Amino acid sequence: MSSRPPSTTRSSPQPTNIPLPEDDQPEAGPSTASSLKSRGSSIPSVSSRKGKERASIEYEGGSDDESEDEVSQDQESEDDDLESDEDDNGGSDVEKGADVEMGGPTDQENDTTPTDGEQTIDDTDDEDDDDDEEEEPALKYSRLKGRIPEILAKDSASTIAVSPRVIALGTHNGMVHILTYEGAKVNSFRPHAASVTCLKMDEENDFVATSSVEGRVVIHSLTSTESYAFDYKRPMRAIALEPGFAKKNTRAFVCGGMAGNLILQEKGWLGYKEQILHSGEGPIWAIEWRGNLIAWANDLGVKIYDTTTSQRIGYIDRGAHAPRAELFKCTLQWKDDHTLVIGWADHIKIVRIRNRAKSQTTNGLPPLTVEMTAIYQVDCMISGLAQYNSSYVVLAYIAPDTYENEATDNPAEQRRKAANRPELRLIDKGEEVNADALSLANYFMYGCNDYSLVKSQRENEDVFFVVSPADVIVVRPRDEIDHIDWLVERERYAEALESAEELRKRHGNALDVKAIGLKYMNHLLSQGHFDQTASLAPKVLGGDSESWEKWIYIFVQHHQLPAIIPFIPTRDPQLGKPVYEMVYGHLLVNDRQELLKTITSWPSDIYDINTVMGAVQGELAASRDDPVLLECLAELHLLNRQPAKALPYFLRLRRPHVFDLIREHNLFTAVQDQALLLVQFDQERQVDKEEVQGDKSKHGAAIELLVDHTHSIPIDRVVLQLEEKPKYLYMYLDALFDKDPQYCLPYSDRMVELYAAFDLKRLMPFLRASNFYDLEKAYEICKERDLVTEMVFLLGRMGNNKKALMLIIERLGDVQRAIDFAKEQSDEDLWEDLLTYSETRPSFIRALLEHVGAEINPIRLISRIRDGLEIPGLKEGVVRVLMGMNLQVSLLEGCQHILNGDCSNLASELQAAQVGSIRCSPSSTCTICQLPLFLPSQKYPSQTLVLIYLCQHFVHATCALPEDVELPQRQENASVTYLLSESKNGSQGWKSRALGGKLGYAAAVRVRVGRCPVCIKGGKVG
């Protein structure tokens, strides 16, 4: 099959006027029309044969040797045709559809069929094809296999019908073959002696109805002996079974033919009854029956009959300039119960059956009417028509041109021109979206009426059958696999690979994705795109180690090994060790930075590490301590589990992660004599502002390492090494003091000196926190550096408070600090010295007045002021003192008032609760458990202690007790005590003893139960 570009459409702005016969004028409704004419009918169909062959489909299963020879001859002939076309087109590969070459008997004269004029049109169309972008075909084609080749080798097909289970094929020899959808033979019978013109099957796959040019109509059962035959003496062209034929007793059918009678046969008690529904308008060419509507075509057009009302409801004219009815077959198809699709000559008409308005039915008109909804005009003759989703599949026949002088005596001009290839077109919403030219066997010998197109009746299956006298072609929509194959054929591998991966995600390994990827890689490699080829390798090669090694050596042969190195797998799959060692050898010579990156990223067990180390050491000796090779060798020692050997290399390279290396591999004993070097290296990094990930220590990673591992790196050993660098020693001892001050006890005096030199802010906290330094030495150090604050503190610790106070007053002049110092020491003599010192200094008196409080009595200070001493701000100070004292008095009075009011209120509440009465009865219940207080219950079978709170809540004592608390032991019975006391001495002392016991018991219970649980739960105080 060769393909051509889809034709453009031209829509008619106004509906086509369709003339109707007088008797049918009232029955026709409004109509719309659009045109699909993309080129003039004079353009020969040879132009649709351009383009290269897409697929070659051969017969399979044929048993006739002669048929096979004829097939091969035809294929050779058509291959020659294709080569000739390609030469004429300048070798253009531009295609728009699928080209299927099908073999069959050929005519040797076919090679000379095209004329000069046709060749000129070919060249013109070829230029148009070159300008169009290549589009993917929508359909794919294959021959029906099985017994079809054998059948058509001895006979020729004339018609076809399908059911949900089987296919029925009628032949020109009068045979009917029942086949499966795969072509296997189910049954064969011969109901006629001449060509089968029409063939229909019922929905139950039981009955097959046929008509023939011999004038007979036969209905044959496939599952029983039931059979009916009718002889009408004139050629019959069409037949249709009533819906549900097998389930109805009427066994009704409609037939018609050259006699021009539309005959309805219906079975009754006495046999079939014949009824002529219509006649007198020429032969009946096609019939379709759906529901209660029968549509048929005659010479004048298409009519529709309603079996419910026994009336014709509509008529669709063929058109004023339509060709003769017998030249081009009519195709009728019910889209649904109310929509009829008509394909006749070069028109497609869509007819809608609708209910007529009630006001019109009173005039005797039928209740249904027809409405033309659309008309499409195409640039071909329609041999078949089928519905495909919202589109239409059209089997197009392009009539050959005729000679201008038809009355010529020239035999060559009198001979009929060879027919063009039929085309299968896909029309959607008036636009032709796909067109494929079918190279059927002997297509040049057949006319429009020799072809048929039917759609499969299987559910959810869009399959079509194209029938010619010598071929049965299966047409299917192209699926995703076909789309991928099409992309691969056009070397659009990236799209093909992406589509294949999407298909594998949804349907598993339905397609060999790897094969597509390998084709893509070879294509990229041939074009020199090595980087793109390498990046594609992981996706395509996957876990195939042999393929990986093969492609790596291919890159080596092309001197492009660096392109694929980043993608070489190290696990799943793992390649052979020589491959990885080859990569290392290449990088050692050509790219040492990439060598280092590869060493750190690849696992060490995939290659011989000693071999690689030997090669690096040899290169290092020749390169005179190349830093990159030094680091490579250090990394290899680490991979070989020799961190102690790697440490010197990292120290030489000043690598920041050396401290992590020491910690990770416990190399502390190896660096205990290199403390100064480690600290110096760490400080150099900080000066250079090198950032080390995870290094958040105060004094750097080296100090942190030394402090954290004092058990492996002794403190005295580190202090001895850092003595020559006091700052480093300060940093070490400061970090050690933060970790545990006990570690620094022997070095306390040294730390005072170091803090005074390098960190004054830490000196005072250290002096306050530590008690193990020499006070005299510390004082001398602070005195040398004139650290007054620290000297004051040390003097205070040594007990020389007066000297310390004099330092504060004389050196600092800070009255507040002097007051605070006096408060800290709690020494009355200090206060006296401070007041004495302030007698002659007005500024001190003013400051003391502002800071007097509980420690200094204002009267004591004011009484020391000498007469006549001028004190700036004295008035404001005295006023402030008086205001402060007044505020204190007011606060005390307010607090006393509040306290008295609270005491009065609480006393009133207590008195009201104590003298008030509480009502209860034997039926009163506990507020907590809601059980009777005094009556026995299941929980309290005997009398239990009841508590009555002043808040008037009654509860069982056990309900008020906290968990794990028991009631105290109850005293003995008072009556027994009385009897015992009377029997002994008859005194009255037992009453006082009984009362005291009750009070004591009540106090013990009160202690255990606490406040009222009901009030506590409610947020009140009980």
Image (cartoon, helix red, strand yellow):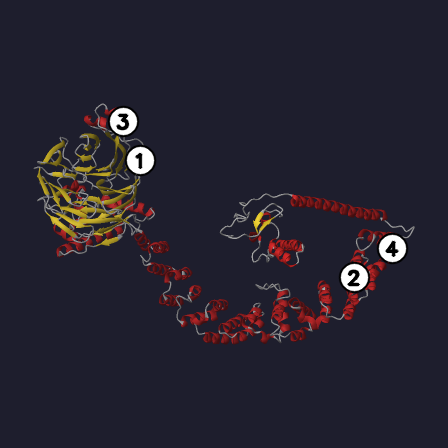
Q: Which residue is mark 2?
A: 825
User: Of the residues under marks 3 and 4, which one precedes in the sequence?
Assistant: 3
Marks 2 and 4, Cα distance to the nearest angstrom? 23 Å
Marks 3 and 2, Cα distance to the nearest angstrom? 118 Å
- How far from the left and from the top, in percent, is residue 255? 14, 37
Marks 2 and 1, Cα distance to the nearest angstrom? 112 Å
Q: Which residue is mark 3?
A: 357
- Is residue 152 visible in the rendered image? The answer is no
For the residues bearing labels 3 and 4, Cβ distance under 8 angstroms: no
- Is residue 292 visible in the rendered image? The answer is yes
Q: Which residue is mark 1?
A: 11
For the residues bearing labels 1 and 3, Cβ distance under 8 angstroms: no
Amino acid bearing label 2: Gln
| Secondary element at image label 1 | loop
| Secondary element at image label 2 | helix
Marks 1 and 4, Cα distance to the nearest angstrom? 116 Å
For residue 841, which numbered disc appears in the image?
Answer: 4
